[in-house]
Amino acid sequence: MNIQQVIVITVILSIISVKPTLSQTKSKADLVVKNANVYTMDAVRSWKQALAVKDGRLVFIGNNTNIKTWIGQKTKIVDAGGQQILPGFHDTHVHQSLNGFQVFRNRSICSSSFWR
């Protein structure tokens, strides 16, 4: 996964509401992701092809044809290449001691027999 995909997923996962405000419907999106498999989590659990983000908020979810109305000269366009975009939460904590142990354990200078 490249940094662009990580950024897109981060933006999508941090969105709380998908209702556009009046000002958002009259302007172009800052970011458009197309050619994706977007799982919407709506009542019928539908899949869409594209989404648009304006001012850090999701303003459109739909197909590759309708997303074109959200694209302006300054819109960043990401072609997801058929990859999935799923809603979710970030786990913002790490158990440093366990993480350090795993890094130490995986180092080549350590004998694998030592840990067994």
Image: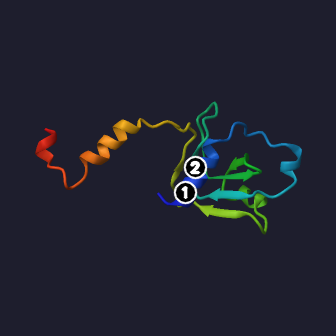
Q: Nearer the viewer, residue 27 or 42?
A: 27
Q: Position of residue 111 (x, y in %)?
A: 14, 49
Left or right of residue 114: residue 54: right
Q: Position of residue 75 (x, y in %)?
A: 74, 63
Q: Nearer the viewer, residue 8 or 38?
A: 8
Name the residue at 84% across, 43% down. Answer: 21
User: For numbered disc 2, what is the local secondary structure?
Assistant: helix
Farthest residue, direction left: 113
Name the residue at 63% across, 58% down. Answer: 34
Mark 2 and mark 1: Cα distance apart in space: 6 Å
Q: Which residue is mark 2?
A: 9
Q: Are marks 2 and 1 in contact (CB under 8 Å)?
A: yes
Name the residue at 13% across, 38% down. Answer: 116
Q: Compared to 70, does 45 lie above or below?
A: above
Indicate the colouring scheme.
rainbow
Q: Position of residue 47 (x, y in %)?
A: 58, 44
Amino acid under disc 2 = Ile
Q: Which residue is mark 1?
A: 5
Q: Position of residue 50 (x, y in %)?
A: 64, 53
Left or right of residue 49: residue 104: left
Give the crowd class for mark 1: few <14, some 14-19, many >=20 residues within 10 Å: some
Q: Nearer the viewer, residue 69 or 3?
A: 3
Farthest residue, direction bottom: 73
Name the residue at 55% across, 43% down. Answer: 86
Amino acid under disc 1 = Gln
Quadrant position of residue 67? bottom right
